[in-house]
Amino acid sequence: MKNIRLLLAAAAAVAVSMPSCKMKSTAAAVEGGAASKVYVAPGKYDEFYNFVSGGFNGQVSVYGLPSGRLLKIIPVFSVFPENGYGYSEETKAMLNTTQGQVPWDDQHHLELSQTNGEQDGRWLFANANNTPRVARIDLKTFKTAEILQLPNSAGNHSSPFITENTEYVVAGTRFSVPLGAEDVPISSFKKNFKSTASFIKVDSSTGHMSLAFQIVLPGMNLDLSHAGKGPSHDWFFFSSYNTEQAYTLLEVNASQKDKDYIVAVNWKKAEEYAKAGKGKKVPAEYAHNTFDEQKQLATSVMEKETLLLDPKDCPDMVYMIPCPKSPHGCDIDPTGEYIVGSGKLAALIPVFSFSKIMDAMQKKDFEGDFQGIPILKYQDVLHGEVQKPGLGPLHTEFDGRGNAYTSMFLSSEVVKWSLKDLKVLDRVPTYYSVGHLMIPGGDTKKPNGKYLVAYNKITKDRYLPTGPELAQSAQLYDISGDKMQLILDYPTVGEPHYGQACPAELIRDKQVKFYDITKNGNQYVTMGEKNVKVVRNGNRVDVYMTAIRSHLVPDNIEGVYVGDNVYFHVTNLEQDWDIPHGFAIKNNPNAELLIMPGETVTLKYTPLKQGIQPFYCTDFCSALHQEMSGYLRVSPKGSNVPLRYGTGETAPAPTAADTVAAK
Amino acid sequence: MKKLTKTGRISIPVVLLLLGALWLFPMWRIDLRAPQYPGGLTMQIWINDVKGDVPIINGLNHYIGMKTIKKEDFKEFVVLPVAMGVFAVLGIVVLLMGKKLPYYIWTGVFVVIAAYSFIDFYKWEYDYGHNLDPGAPIQVPGMAYQPPLIGYKQLLNFEVLSQPDVAGWCYIVSGIILASVAIYEWKKR
Ligand SMILES: [Cu+2]
């Protein structure tokens, strides 16, 4: 009895003293002066464009830094009813795959194009994790310009990282699968399952992508990757896990070995082997979708084969570097000498030296092989280890001043350390569970070491609660001084994984403001209101329509029947910045359109019931926007209402038959 | 008939050169500014064309029922180049004759063309600003939209500034040269 009383008293004492103990409070983490550092006055521009992956929403969102203001959402792998992407006849084909239209995806990583290891502001590459695809977004228009599907891949995770001059975009598979579409037992993993590293060639002037070759690797999970730079220019590095080759209960079975590997690929050699015919051309079907800006039309081509390179036939092309333990990030410092592995289950950060790797390869000093691929000795190639950095190191970027910043998923913090002596210099908490982090240009030769953004997985108490599903969060740190300082957090769209940022001036002044209508090559363009028409061909009706402030021509259409396929080809005649028009028709089950000035976009509509269907502009374009509307008369199938259309003086006038009908 | 002084003779090619600018640069510019056009809009009037943001201005003008501004509607774009061409040929004749009287006449012709151009420009502005479509969507009672002949004016939400452009200035300088040389020649009689 006495004991119980004592215990209770002790419990009470603890409870009373709780508020006074030194538990970290999230609010206290922001120091004074932070607001002025992120304040961008009305009418002023942000310093950086920040492109953030959308995770399960399949899109890319664009924020301004340091304000954290959302500027745009770019639909990439997902249909977007807001502007008709993936719904309009012009853009439908962008989402074509060998499995038909796949109108969603899981978008994880982004990479801005580079020239000589520095950002050039031309294109942004984005990966689709689920149905393996890589997209190229044109930064003059912020539109998805191209999507390439990848064969022999599943879980396109270590993608879309690029070489220094954007020679290649890579795509490493996360889930190993049998090559082709072989029907094999899952338990034959070791024998039949392979991982591939795909190298996509990028045309230096047009940006057009083509699958150059795929390197076939043992069955394992490739996680992330980065290309070398400077001295390591010829190399690409991929982190891997599940080198145990487990195929069930991976959380245990793929965490057995003390070390997995960083896969070092000499892509220059691979390129030579491919040219020399060392590869094997095999049948493979994959979609290649391109948006032709001239014709304003996406087309989809089914590619028929791929070139496989087997390391067995290509000596000195692939090496394995042991790395503790289930490495995630695999990041190369701005000099190209240091390769930072970060084992998400490891309690240290191994840093490898490129020159030591080269020496070890030269001496052929191996500790064995992994399914025929030579394994270098850990100690031989190690520059050193960062001791006790925190828990769950995931991803490292650099500030260009000799410092590295690593995100710590488990201990929810960012840790700054020195590349030279591998000493921890500073640490700041994140809210909460940071995945990737990003410094503008932090994975290039020339980082801009002013800001760092942490992309967090959990938000909890950061914002006003919104039911069970909360916004995800990004946190902005000022890293210009010795101490990192949290200055802002802002909610993000979707689940952000990785981001890229570059100085605004790299992109800002190149923006296309409107399309020159005289260069409109869309086959359904209507050049001026005089040329509008409605044409019937069987049960297909083509409406050639124009939009200008503040009317649509024609705005009266009759003679359309239930079950017709009506194609509204709407040309926006405006030639001024920021004057899109919208187009929507009542009861249309797919979407609306947003048509940019000088552009032609087509919406398909199949009326299921008779009736008068109003159509209208959805984008508040002018003082008379509400008046920008018209009517489509849908008559019963088999009736003989003649095809008539017009606007104003040419609108259909009542006929004798109408008068009779009205009586 | 008295001969032209050296100054008089030199002034002729100088004036002809200055007038050559009419084919290289715009004569007049009208700048518009409104909150929703932070970069402003500009219409440039050339000797034979109207350029700049004309399509955008036309788009705006349709609310108030102004006529569409298009090159084809201006006989001036044919007449003025011809007039200036004839004027240039006359200048060469005056130079060859080298006499004072033809110089006075030549200056007189210039004054007539200039005066006519300004009157015509004013009439054009008046017509566009006043002759509005009675069915226009926006009608402000008592409002006309004639831009200023020269200078600044507020028209609804737009600030309008009308002024000579490069060739216009060349034209003005030509006029000043002609007038001052004519007076000089008269005094040197
Ligand atoms: Cu509109």
Image: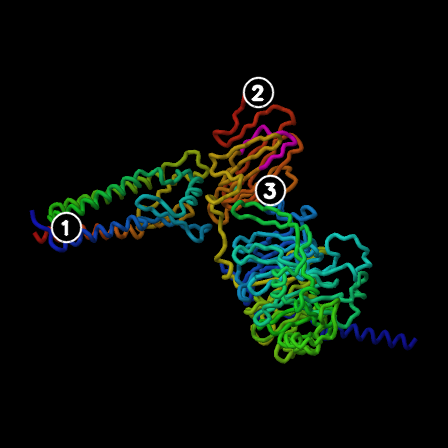
Q: Are marks 3 and 2 in contact (CB under 8 Å)?
A: no
Give me the disc on residue A480: none
The x and y percentages for residue B43 are: 37, 47
Dot 1 amino acid type: Ala
Mark 2: C-beta under 8 Å from nearest atom of ligand 1: no
Q: Is disc 2 placed on a helix, strand or loop? A: helix
* Residue under numbered circle 1: B182
Q: Quadrant of residue A445?
A: bottom right
Give the Cα distance between marks 3 and 1. Answer: 71 Å
Q: Residue under mark 2: which chain is it in?
A: A
Discs 3 and 2 share one subunit: yes
The x and y percentages for residue B70 are: 38, 40
Discs 1 and 2 share one subunit: no
Residue B58 seen anywhere in this rendered image of the structure: yes
A255 vs A596, left or right, is: right
The x and y percentages for residue A293 are: 53, 48
Q: Quadrant of residue A199?
A: bottom right
The x and y percentages for residue A240 are: 71, 66
Nearer to me, A1 or A369: A369
Whether A430 is among the magenta residues is: no
* Residue under numbered circle 3: A89
For the point 57% across and 22% down, which residue is it? A658
Q: Is disc 1 placed on a helix, strand or loop? A: helix
Q: Are marks 3 and 1 in contact (CB under 8 Å)?
A: no
* Residue under numbered circle 2: A657
Q: Residue furthest bottom?
A: A421
The span shown in magenta is A555-567
Dot 3 amino acid type: Glu
Dot 2 amino acid type: Ala
Q: Residue under mark 1: which chain is it in?
A: B
Whether A561 is among the magenta residues is: yes
